[in-house]
Image (tube, rainbow, N blue to C red):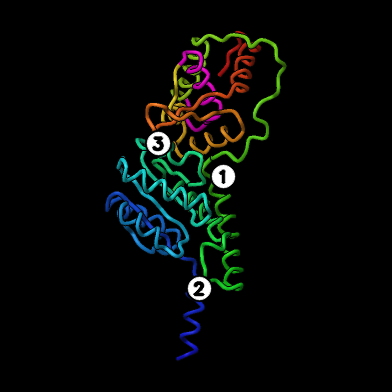
Amino acid sequence: MDTITAEAFSNSYSTPAPILIAGDSAAARQRAQRTIEASGMRIGASLGLDDALGRIALQASASAIWVELDEDQGERMDRLLDRVRSEAEEGRCPVVVAGSGALIDPLMSRLGESPVELVIDGSEMDRSAALAIALSGAHRSDRLSDVASDQNNARLRQLSDEVSRIASTLARLSTGPSAVPRSFVPQNDAEVPPVSAETVRSVIRARRLRSRYFADDLFADPAWDMLLDLLQAEIAQLRVPVSSLCIAAAVPATTALRWLKTMTDNGLFVRRADPHDGRRVFVELSPQASAAMRRYFAEVGNAAVV
């Protein structure tokens, strides 16, 4: 009896901790549950937003927190997002937040600079990729568990390495960016040439026309589409929220958000909080990116730029 108990005790420690689900509806929680179960992970609890907020404070160990949102829940949602962001930033627990396209702006206002994995209107592959990427670092902090032995830590590191390889593969399949090796070519301080808004609009229209004759994914180039959209907005003195920029990228929103982060990290984009709406973030070209785009248009002249 003692041998069996000890073995069961040991196996329980070598099994990754369960995942906590927080959702704003029963349907949302069931959707998250299907994704997690399909990934072979255990579920510790599936709770509403308010109950989940209290549970996180008491949670001793979790592989991840998955937040699934159908609608904007206002302050209730914001409080939970602030808490899970803190969990992710301080390395206590990786976090995935999944929601609809209507939630892009409030989600980005709370999570845009954080290590939280965001999934917007994601396919099952997008959702599985986000979970794999989150779990790839789930057990790297000793703070995630105060009972693991050296042997168990070795096993968790092995599992983490395995998930990292899966995450890398899924991330490539989901067409997200890996890195931009050089954001822009340094230029001299000569005067930046003017570019008309109509010139940029005509290029954007031409790019969109291609979808009449070929499949959209054949020419997917979200980085360039976002650069064009932000240049057009800058010339017209318009502000572009994250949600609008994701539409301009002409790729699934989750992929667009990955590109947005990459472009920001590489100094091409700048995020600005909306001073009139704390739940919205604007994006604009950095001064260097703006100058590079304007010089590019001046150099190509009347040539077809698509």
Residue sitting farthest toward the bottom? 1
Which residue is identified by label 3? 104
Camera-side residue of 232 and 56: 56
Which callout, 1 or 2, points to the residue nearer the camera? Answer: 2
Q: Residue at x 52, y 72 (%)?
A: 147
Q: Secondary structure at mark 2?
A: helix
* Residue 246 visible, this angle: yes
Q: Is residue 242 magenta?
A: no
Precedes in sequence: disc 1 or disc 2: 2
Amino acid on which the number 1 mark rests in the picture:
Arg
- What amino acid does circle 2 point to? Tyr
Crowd class of label 1 (few under 14; some 14 to 19; many from 20; radius 10 Å): few
Of 177 and 279, which appears nearest the observer?
279
Q: How many marks?
A: 3
Counting residues from the N terminus, which is met first, the one under dot 3 or under dot 2? 2
Task: Identify the residue shown where x is 50% and y is 57%.
Answer: 92
Q: Residue at x 57, y 73 (%)?
A: 149
Quadrant housing the C terminus: top right
In the picture, measured across the screen, residue 59 lies left or right of residue 191, that is left
Is disc 1 in contact with disc 2, using a CB cutoff of under 8 Å? Answer: no
The disc label shown at residue 172, or none: 1
Which of the two discs, 3 and 1, labels the residue nearer the N terminus?
3
The answer to whether residue 215 is visible is no
Dot 1: what SS?
helix
Return the residue at label 2: 13
40 on left or right of 288: left
Q: Position of residue 44 (x, y in %)?
A: 38, 64
Q: Which residues are magenta?
A: 214-237
Q: How far apart are the two marked residues, 3 and 2, measured between alpha carbons?
A: 38 Å
Up/down of 92 relative to 304, above or below: below
